[in-house]
Every structure is written in C-alpha cells, then in structure tokens.
Amino acid sequence: MNTILTIETTCDETAAAVVARNHNVLSSMIASQQEVHERFRGVVPELAARAHLERIAPVIASVIADSGIDPEHDLAAVAVAIEPGLPGSLLVGLSAAKALCVAWNKPLVSINHVQAHIYACQIGRTESIFPCVGFVVSGGHTNLYRCHSANRWQYLGGTIDDAVGEAFDKVAVMLGLPYPGGPHISRLAKLGNPKAYDLPRPMVSDRSTQNLSFSGLKTAVRYHLVGTGKQDFQSLVLTDTQRADMAASFQRAAIDCVTAKAQLALESSGLRRLCVGGGVAANEELRRSLQAMADRQKFELLISPLELCTDNAVMGAIAWEKVDLGDFSALDIDVQPGLLRGE
Ligand code: KG4
Ligand code: ZN
C-alpha cells in the first residue's frame, strides 16, 4: 500500500502516474492531444473529452504495467483531478477513477489541479515547501495563493480576464506561430528587442489588489500589429524583425505583470518563500526574472521542475497529503469545473 495511481484529465493532456509515498515516480505517461486541437489554434472542449475517452484506459493500463505493481495489493488510493478544468474532460478522468476504486476496492482522493501545479515544486525535495506564496501561471489559470499547508490554501488574487498562458497563445496566433504558442513566443523572443514596442502592464501600478489582467495587453499587441479595424491575421505581412520584436516586447510585458504581483503577494503576506508552477513557469525568461528578483530581495524561490510545468500526473503526488490524513472522497462526488476562490 505504498503507491498511489494519479489521473489527470483537466484539459487536453491525458496523463496517469504511479507515485510512491516518498514521491518516487514508478511510472508516468502523458498522451498529448496536440494534433487534435492545433488546427483550431486552441482547445475544443468536446474534442478534448472524446480524445480523453479514447486514451484514458490505455494510458492507465500502461502506467500500471510499467510500474510493476499489483494494484489490488500495492495501491493505497486512486487519485484524480476533479477541479478546475473543462467539464467533459474532468468527467472522463473521474469516471475512470471511480470505476477503478470499485474494481480494486480502493479509496478515492480528489485533487485540485491548480494546487497540484504548485505542489510540483515539492517533488524531489525533502523539506516542506509550506508555508509559501503559491503562484500558478498556466494556460487556464493565473492565481496567487497563501498556502498555509498542503491542505489549507487562501486565494489572494488572480487574473480578472485571460490567463497569462492564454495571452501567450493568442499573441502567438497573431504572429502566425503554431499552437500552443508559449514555447514558440519564448524562442522567437530571444531574437527580438523587448523595448521595440511600448506595451501596457495592466494593473501593475495598482498595489491595492493582487489581481492581474492580460486582455488589455493582448489587445494592445493587436492594435500595434493591425490597427483598430478588423483584420485577418493570416493575411498580415510582418518582417522577421517585427515578429521577433513583438514576441520579445509582449513576453517582457507579461513577465513584468507576473513578477510585480508575485512581489506584492510576498510583501502583503509577509511570507518569504514563493512557489511557482504551471505551463508558463517553463518560460526561461520568466524563470530568470523571478530568480533575479529573489536574489535582490532575498526570498526563497522554488519553481516547478521543467518537466512538471505543463500538465502531468506526477504532480498529483499532492494526493499523498490527503491519504495520510484519511481525507477520502465519496464515490458519488462530482467534478467542479470552476475555480473555488475561498479557502
Ligand atoms: O499548465 P498547462 O499545461 O495547462 C493548464 O493547466 O492550463 O499550461 C499550458 C500553457 C499554454 O498556454 C502554453 O502556451 C504555456 O503553458 N507554455 C508556455 C511555455 N511552455 C508552455 N508559455 C510561455 N513560455 C513557455 N516556455
Ligand atoms: Zn494545468
């Protein structure tokens, strides 16, 4: 009973892992749906749910086989992300988890996906990351938490419109880059001048709130590129220099927003440790900027290991924190697609 099976189907990756109590990963698999969604330049929820349905059983069978465990004998629980996420996608993972709990007579543990992103910073570390300010920067979320312990979180603020990763993806579309656009913007930005375009840093100067906003920044990119009228981005002709300069200018502005609110959250909470997770935490320039800030201001910075930034099931190791408390979910539990902002 020293392993758990973790299942992740909140958005467009079908993932499962077998993780030991000490966070040793016995097996892990991520079945990407990139080829399903890339021609739409964004995730299509109905297609995501159907793709999960095709992939979920083979992915789970694979990780169980690769781990070498006997699930009935070796599993302490089956854990699954039930919030937040796309409703249809969440339902596939939860249904699979419930069926396995019945078949193997195991308790069910529910995982909050956003908390799991931040908990990725705990993997591979022996000392606890708590208490800390937790910051999730992903395609679906950009939220700050005061994390008292693995099971006690307080919402501090977050985006009031687009998530930062969503802004990366939408600007990438304007620049003619493939989906998901974050890694492509990051590569292109290395060739550009971050000061070439004067872009806004929405809400950064407002120190009364830890909320963020990215839609104005995204719209400013659009106006710089095509003006205020309607324009089809596919017919937009940009030079390589313009594209690289815009990628660099946008990335710099987005990072300035993230680092400013991280700093504000640390100051107002009085905490001296920042844990950052989620897909955008893979961004090299963001990692560098956060590290520079941590060095300057002498707080401890933990960023998710690169391979655990984007969606995966290993970060579902947070479920151990509930297993150890006997905090299990009933088998009639439902998914919770929206983000709960309270404690
Ligand atoms: O955490 P994740 O896999 O999914 C959500 O829970 O939303 O994050 C995916 C997001 C996408 O928007 C993707 O463009 C962004 O993370 N991303 C990046 C980078 N790698 C992934 N954004 C900026 N720079 C990167 N290197
Ligand atoms: Zn995620």
Image: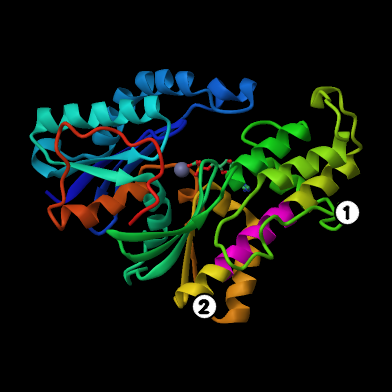
- Say which amino acid is labelled 1: Ala
117 to 66, vertically: above or below: below
Residue 261 magenta: yes
Identify residue for label 1.
Answer: 196
Badge 2 crowding class, 10 Å Cα cut-off, few under 14, some 14 to 19, many 20 or more, is some
19 to 175, vertically: above or below: below
- Say which amino acid is labelled 2: Phe
Q: What stretch is highlighted in magenta?
A: 251-263
The one nearer the camera, 337 or 272, is 337
- Disc number for residue 127: none
At 70% from the left and 55% from the top, the residue drawn is: 202
At 52% from the left and 78% from the top, the residue drawn is: 299
- Label 2 element class: loop
- Disc number for residue 299: 2
Ligand 1 closer than 8 Å to label 2 CB: no
Q: In the rendered image, which quarter is residue 71 located in?
A: top left
At 43% from the left and 20% from the top, the residue drawn is: 51
Give the tally of numbered discs.
Answer: 2
Q: Looking at this rendering, what residue extends furthest in the front direction? A: 208
- Label 1 element class: loop
Q: Is 33 situated left or right of 188 in this image?
A: left
The one nearer the camera, 161 or 278, is 161
Badge 1 crowding class, 10 Å Cα cut-off, few under 14, some 14 to 19, many 20 or more, is some
Would you say residue 46 is visible in this rendering? yes
Where does residue 114 sit, x and y in percent of width and height?
A: 41, 48
Q: In the rendered image, which quarter is residue 165 located in?
A: top right
Lower sequence index among marks 1 and 2? 1
Where does residue 139 sit, x and y in percent of width and height?
A: 55, 41
What colouring method underlies this structural image? rainbow
Would you say residue 285 is visible in this rendering? no
Where does residue 15 sit, x and y in percent of width and height?
A: 38, 35
Residue 155 magenta: no
